[in-house]
Image (cartoon, rainbow, N blue to C red):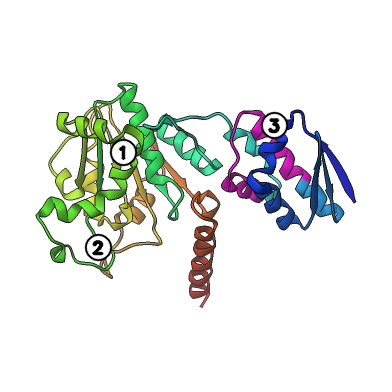
């Protein structure tokens, strides 16, 4: 079977095919079809069902291109996953939502429906809890939303914190004073802020007290008004630490709590404060809970495959 797709503009066809036809090759491989471009026409050939899926994927990608979106391998793979679910019409919801502009002028946008839901939840709720695997953009998007609120003068401060819990190492063995010992734990937060603000602006805001990056232990006894507060790696908090953090909330403030409940580094026998608060706060008004899946991973495709492989092992253990 063969099917013809008409492309409105030649440059859209060029964008669709991608560098060295990489985008089209992904679709050809996924659906075992052939795609040939002739002028403003694309001819898709193969088994009828496969051709139908490939055409839907190509049309979804063209709708993104028509809205001015750039295509990447991640876009294409995500579009394929939506087609396979029969929900490719949702891809249009992703177009055009810029939440922040980086220091280098790059617009930052949600790349998956899960990320879009997360950004909307942060915007519309006082406390948002984002839970999911590595690479889903939980921390990065939270920092982007914080910078957006700060630039719009909705808050006076950005406070980023995470528990200094070691993934197998001991703090005491690291060289230097306390600050240099905890800095490695806070590095992902610094990196995200540098991306959004640039190193010079970041340093200036830190000196003025507008930005604070500190271990969770430093939060005790404070009330945080007019602040955007992000707790990262929350799966490594204890129940007591989580309660302490949540009760820091002051007037005109927002909180975002992020974590991955499959990567808990607490000593065995300690219950994760993140797992606990998901149950305790489930039906509390103005607190949103957003669950990411491996489909929301925006890192290398192998990261998705690794997460799936670990999930299968955990399921098998549970079944036994």
Residue 166 numbered tag = 2
Vertical position of residue 29 compared to residue 216: above or below: below
Q: Residue pushed farthest bottom? A: 320
Residue beneath disc 1: 194
Q: Position of residue 120 (x, y in %)?
A: 47, 33
Instruction: Report the mark closest to the observer, 1 or 2.
Output: 1
Looking at the image, is mark 3 or mark 1 nearer the viewer?
A: 3
Residue occupying the far front of the picture: 20
Question: 128 and 93: which one is in front?
Answer: 93
How far is the residue under mark 1 from the one under mark 2?
24 Å
Report the residue at 26% width, 55% height from top.
Answer: 237
Task: Give the residues drawn in magenta, as a range.
Answer: 55-81
The residue at which mark 3 appears reads as 11
Who's the residue at 72% across and 57% down the image?
29
- Mark positioned earlier in the residue sequence (3 or 1): 3
Closest to the camera, between mark 2 and mark 3, is 3
């Amino acid at each position: 079977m063969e099917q013809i797709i008409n492309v409105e503009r030649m440059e859209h066809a060029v964008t669709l095919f991608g560098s060295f036809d990489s985008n089209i090759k992904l679709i050809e491989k996924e659906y075992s079809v052939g795609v040939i471009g002739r002028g403003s026409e694309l001819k898709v050939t193969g088994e009828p069902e496969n051709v139908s899926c490939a055409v839907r994927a190509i049309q979804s990608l063209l709708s993104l291109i028509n809205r001015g979106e750039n295509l990447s391998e991640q876009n294409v793979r995500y579009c394929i996953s939506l087609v396979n679910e029969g929900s490719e019409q949702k891809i249009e919801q992703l177009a055009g939502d810029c939440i922040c502009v980086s220091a280098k002028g790059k617009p930052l946008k949600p790349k998956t429906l899960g990320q879009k839901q997360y950004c909307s939840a942060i915007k519309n709720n006082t406390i948002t809890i984002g839970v999911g695997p590595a690479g889903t953009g939980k921390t990065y998007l939270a920092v982007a939303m914080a910078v957006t609120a700060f630039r719009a003068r909705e808050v006076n401060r950005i406070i980023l914190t995470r528990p200094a819990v070691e993934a197998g190492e001991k703090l005491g063995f690291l060289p230097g004073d306390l600050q240099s010992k905890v800095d490695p734990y806070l590095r992902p937060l610094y990196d995200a802020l540098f991306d959004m603000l640039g190193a010079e602006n970041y340093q200036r805001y830190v000196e003025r007290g507008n930005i604070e990056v500190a271990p969770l232990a430093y939060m005790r006894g404070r009330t945080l008004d007019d602040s955007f507060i992000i707790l990262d790696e929350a799966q490594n908090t204890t129940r007591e630490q989580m309660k302490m953090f949540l009760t820091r909330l002051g007037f005109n403030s927002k909180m975002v709590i992020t974590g991955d409940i499959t990567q808990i580094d607490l000593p065995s026998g300690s219950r994760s404060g993140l797992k606990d608060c998901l149950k305790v706060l489930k039906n509390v008004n103005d607190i949103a809970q957003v669950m990411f899946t491996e489909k929301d991973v925006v890192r290398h495709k192998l990261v998705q495959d690794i997460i799936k492989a670990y999930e299968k092992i955990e399921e098998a253990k549970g079944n036994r």
